[in-house]
Image (tube, helix red, strand yellow):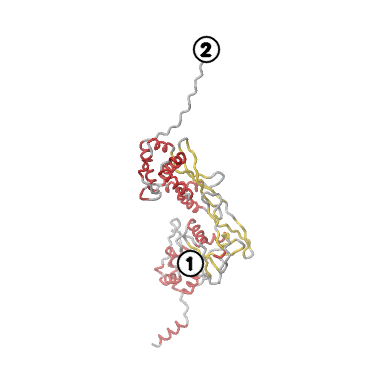
Amino acid sequence: MANRKKKKTPPKPRFIHVVTKSFFDQYSLSARKLLQQFGFDPDLFDQFSKKQKLKMMMVQMLPPKVSVKYGHSVPRQYVNYIKLEVHNYLKGYFGDASLKMTYEEFVTTGLSFISYVTRLNDKQGDIASEFVRNFSTLIAELEKEDYLIVSLLEFVQNQLFEISKINIRLYGVMWGFEIESPKSVAGHLYLTAAAPECVNFTWHNKVRPAYRLGNGNLNELTPFWVTVPRNSVVPGSFDESPLNIYVQNHALMRIKERLDTLIPYNRNAAIMFSLLDFKIVKAKTGRILCTFIDAKNQLLGYLPFTIEGDKLFVLSFIPLSCPTVPEGSRLCKILNITKEDMEFLGMDKLSFYQNTDFDAIPNLKAALIEAGLWHLTEIEPEETIKDRPLVKSTGVIAKFFQEIKPESNNEDILSEVAKMYD
């Protein structure tokens, strides 16, 4: 029987990444922009031989991908939202905008070039060129501060802050790299999720839930928890120990009801800004309150709170129209109205100040200016809810204030009597 020769199994073809001329030219242009970003002469790129240039281009860096970290749960619609926002962000400029280097160029070509030069420095050591040594030293310093990708991470974290809720879930982001193929690597934005921390406390003989104030963290699984020094909250105290901040669910509901024309992101941001920059004011009743401000440092109301041990509990939200706070007290006195009158008209809601035609009610406009509430009328309502119908129309409000006459004091009465005998 004739011997049959076994056919040799052909070797698996090696993956070869072909560097096209257009890719070579684009990479070279981006590398020169990067050198200028970091204060180097762009012509230093020509120190590398053509062989070295081709070698640094062999491994392609792909645009960052958004995914959920293993073991974490993030709703699909939130993941898609972050993907879209990242895609748009990558089209913007990195660093000096005059160089017109997009962030996508930086995280692809830029990081590829940085990786090659720093590895070359490690390999050559003392024989590396002065440029390679200086460039690698600068990159090492920037990496200590996460400068290379920090703006992208902060952008993503800011978008996650919009969808995070301290009573539902806190979202964060971590950065890493994954090999996509033998010749390609991609940065990954891993979304993380942390459950809220809830505690129960007793107020007015009733047990109430409160949620710890925090935010999803950058490159860490543990949320960033907000604290405030005790001496900045308690007048006359020298105790600098931190107080953990918890917000009662009732306060979250009141903020949502009263600031009814702000989207959740702006309400969340206002809560964070206010409690990070904890400023206290004494109410008419003598109670100490925390000012509630927005991102533009505009006063929107006040937060009553209580302290138990190392915990500070935010109890509710008080609008500026409330008679117990300075602005509301002045307004009631000027217009001779009560808290019940204001609630009837909807003056305890932000929509009242944004949707009423105050030029048709000049006495009310003057009173708001004098009492310190006029800035509420200048806050733009969010597009998604600005067309919501009002509880009371401008006509009803105008009629109400035409029927109210301020109480006369002794000085006014004497003045009227004197006019009668002139």
Q: Quadrant of the N terminus?
A: top right
Asked if marks 1 and 2 touch (Cβ < 8 Å), the reply is no
Q: Which residue is mark 1?
A: 347
Q: Which circle marks residue 2 in the picture?
A: 2
Query: Closest to the observer: 173 or 413?
Result: 173
Where is 347 relative to 91, above or below? below
Give the answer, above or below, for where 141 lies relative to 209.
above
In the rendered view of the protein, which quadrant contains the C terminus? bottom left
| Residue 403 rendering spot, x and y as whole percentages | 45, 74
Q: Residues within 10 Å of mark 1 (few under 14, many from 20)?
A: many
Please provide percent x and percent y for residue 262: 47, 59
- Mark number displayed over residue 191: none
Q: Which residue reaches farthest front? A: 126
| Mark nearer the N terminus (1 vs 2) | 2
Q: Quadrant of residue 214?
A: bottom right
Q: Is residue 28 above or below residue 209?
A: above
Secondary-structure class at tag 2: loop
Tell me which amino acid carries mark 2.
Ala
Q: Label 1 sits on what residue type?
A: Met
Most distant residue in the right direction: 205
How far apart are the alpha carbons under marks 1 and 2?
103 Å
Q: Nearer the viewer, residue 146 or 132?
A: 132
| Residue 150 locus on image (x, y percent) | 47, 50
